[in-house]
Amino acid sequence: MNEYDRDKYCIIGAGASGLAVAKSFVERGIPFDLLERESDIGGLWNINTASGIVYETTHLISAFSTTAFEDYPVSTDDPTGTERDYPDHASVLDYFRRYCHMFGIARHLQTGTPVERVTRRDDGAWQVMVAGETRPRTYAGVVVANGHHDKPRRPQYPGHFNGEIIHSRDYRSTRQLRDKKVLVVGAGNSGCDIVKDAAFTSGFPATLSMRRGTWFVPKFILGFPTGDVLANVEWALTLVPRALKAYLFQASLWVLQGPPSRYKLPDPDHRIDQAHPTLSDDIPRLAAHGRVIVKPAIERLDGRDVVFADGSRAEFDMIVLATGYELGIPFLDRQYYLGGDGKPRLFLNTAHPDHPNLFFAGLIQANGSIWRLAWLQGRIIANAIIAERTAPTESRAFRNRVRACTGPVSKERFVGSERHKLEVNYFDYARELKKVIRSFAKSSTQNFPSTSSAVAAPGQMQQAAE
């Protein structure tokens, strides 16, 4: 007869979100395993693993001062300190490593443990099948924190292209672009990084295909990191309606840099807070200089030529699809987290309405630090687990609130695209998370009470030691 620890939770994924939740669990004494499919931590920020989607020139697109975990801020003597407002991917990964060791997360970490399947047992516990193991592990609950940048979204176009087509996930180095006429599809942050690299290293002007106009937000405003400026403005204008804040920010950009059309870029047909922002000082300048040529959507492919929606055509050697990722968790049935419209049906994209021991972290897209939002989600998850044992009144109130969840997390009107199905406004969403945290008045000050070490579970594999 094998055993499983009825108190122990499983956190899946050791990227930023998984580490944030793990820190709260360590702090509150909740037993857990942190399972990571790769041989190292870091998730999408680790260029040396299959999960990593960064490239050699990747830098943080939001200021480190407003992105780093609130419980582990950077300092001027830190290797990734405030002297570098936008550190590179290696510095970010080093920060994660120090966070992992600083808070004792490393001893719970099990690398090289890809999760193949997560299923719920009749008694409410969860079975986690790890690749290479003959029997599933059993846990009291599961926190899904594996991210949503795994399966590339690859649009299909009529015709055939005789050159090379790659997704941005496959891009690693400017060496891939040298001596090639490059077309980048998509004006998100990755697409703009890659088209900038192509403009500087390919030997030819680079081309950027945009389906719609985009608001390009500079990384600095009046010499200060944009994130710092927005955070201060948000605090000063706390009581001002969101639409008015968006109008003021949009008007400020027009005053400081003018409309995108002034740089030979299409003007957006949406408000600045209705789509995920693209932070780039370079694209407007490169477009104005003719180093980046802007084209509309692709209509069809024709040998080495690409025909665009305006009827124009151009010859290319490589097409880079910076077209994002499909929303999906490969080891979990979609019914556990998605509604019919493809949007999560979870309370604040964090807690499941029917299963009190199934949680999610980082299943969001925001105009701010996902790390900090996952850290707040981790505090809610820890509070909910502890309240179930120590504060039944708070636990019931939370579960009633979770069960009342019937729609997407955000009521804002975002651009109707696959990319925005997880979109939230960072500041509004963070406020909601903090309200929920404050609702755990009693349990938030308590640690997890261990009731037993193990219960019999016939046919189950014993948990790997921490």
Image (cartoon, rainbow, N blue to C red):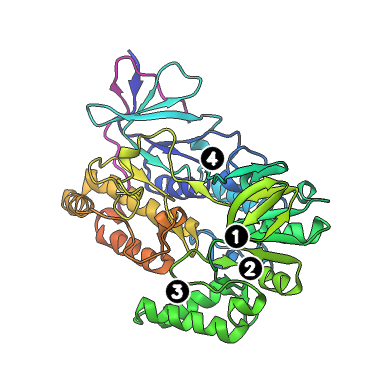
* Residue 314 seen in the current view: yes
Magenta-drawn stretch, dominant element (helix, strand or loop): loop
Which mark lies nearer to you, 2 or 3?
3
Read off the residue under disc 3: 271
Comes first in the chain, label 4 or label 1: 4
User: Was residue 201 drawn as part of the magenta stretch in this picture?
Assistant: no
Distance (Cα) linking label 3 and label 1: 18 Å
**Mark 2 in CB contact with mark 1 (< 8 angstroms):** yes
Read off the residue under disc 1: 189
Q: Which residue type carries mark 3? A: Arg
Q: Which residue type carries mark 2? A: Ser
* Residue 47 seen in the current view: no
Question: Which quadrant is home to the N terminus?
Answer: top left
Q: Position of residue 303 (x, y in %)?
A: 71, 44
- Judged from this view, the residue extending furthest toward the bottom is 255
Which mark lies nearer to you, 4 or 2?
2
Q: Position of residue 278 (x, y in %)?
A: 57, 65
Circle 3: element type? loop
